[in-house]
Amino acid sequence: MEKSQDVTHQDRPRLYYGYVVVTAASIMMVMIWGTFHAFGVFFEPFIREFGWTRAMTSGASALNTMIFGILCIFSAGLSERLGPRWVMTICGIILGLGYFLMAQLTHAWELYLYFGVFVAIGMSPYIPLLSLVPQWFTTNRGRMNAIVLSGMGLGTMIVPPIASTLISVWQWRSSYLVISISTLIVMVAVSQFLRGGPNLPVNGKERRPDIGFADQRNEGITLREAICTRQFVLVCLLYFSFLFCVVSIVVHLVIHTIGLGIPATRAAFTLSLIGGACIVGMNVMGNMADRFSNKIGLGISYLLMGLSLVWLIASHSEWSFYLFSIAFGFAYGGMQVLFSPLVAELFGTRSHGVILAAGALVGSIGAAIGPIFAGYIFDSVGSYTVAFILCAVLAFAGLVSTFLLQKKPKS
């Protein structure tokens, strides 16, 4: 009996595998969101070479976010059935293929197909990556979620400037070719380290619990039950305003600053600052949520985003855009890191992935409308002012919505 106990003790892993999963998910976030946010860097070369309008070019980003939002629900379900490793491997291959085809771009319909459809399919397991955190951790979810999502900020910080430099040296087609090869290698390799949390069923079989994990998969409510609550409506409104603002800014900020006389490489640096500040915001707000509440963190983030957008309206100098990027990125990171633990707090972990994906689907409507609206406004009046004002209004509307959240959903 004693020998058996000794063997069991010796066989215990020294490193909790949840930390490996969090690290792998963070690396994949670098590739998924760094390459997506680099689209704004390619905006001006597309318009210059093909003569497309800003609204037309923005439409590809809108289609991407709509398909991405829809597929997030399916990828979440597939990940729960098959495990995240296979889902992410397949999607990683598709993502690399999408960017490879972008390097061959010649017509507008190809832009919509390659970036709007193929890249969106490759990005769709974003929600399953976030859902891994509450599966592996019952405490410090905000902190672990911040680590995963820091990959998003890091990707935004490093990929757009690299892409901009490659464009200036080798032109935009070669830049997309480098992105495609890098994405394919990293996504497929890192996917092999992913696996679902302890006790989650995979192919009909139960896993043995890992050390330090309390199984909570049956706690909470289903998606059907969640949809009937006021809290779900508020989460959808929060997601809508959040993604409307973020995607509009990410797509149009660089070309907006270039239009005011700032060189392209320095204009791309605004996205780097957003990415760097995003990492800080994720970690600060993630820790704040663990100590206080997601509601407080979200309120602060929406307030800061609204104020930063008001500042952007009056910004014309390079330093003012850098200051905006820091404040906006911090708020962006704070919001991004809090949605997953907020859903777990409001609805439990029983159907966490699909509930979060459903909220993201509604948010993707805002992400689709935002950049098209901003591009249309500029094409019509030659200014982004009206678009930025609407973004600020939505950010403050998100602030009001956070005050209406309650910990327990009511039908």
Image: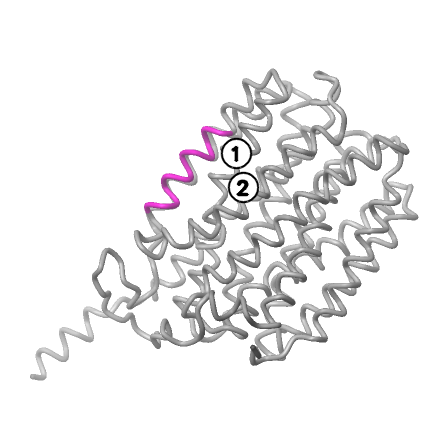
Which label was assigned to residue 117?
A: 1
Q: Secondary structure at mark 2?
A: helix
The secondary structure type at the circle numbered 1 is helix
Q: Kindly identify which residue carries mark 2.
A: 67
Packing grade of label 1 (10 A; few <14, some 14-19, many >=20) is many
Decide whether residue 89 is among the magenta residues: yes
Around disc 2, counting alpha carbons within 10 Å, would you say few (fewer than 14), some (14 to 19), or many (20 or more)? many
Residue at (77% x, 63% y) in the render: 397
Q: Nearer the viewer, residue 159 or 66?
A: 66
Q: Is residue 388 above or below residue 174?
A: below
Q: Which mark is residue 71?
A: none
Q: Quadrant of residue 343?
A: bottom right
Which residue is located at x 64 percent, y 39 percent?
A: 62
Question: Predominant secondary structure in magenta?
Answer: helix
Region in magenta: 86-98
Residue 42 lies in quadrant: top right
Residue located at (71% from left, 38% from top):
251
Mark 2 touching mark 1, by CB under 8 A? yes
- Which sits earlier in the primary sequence, circle 2 or circle 1? 2
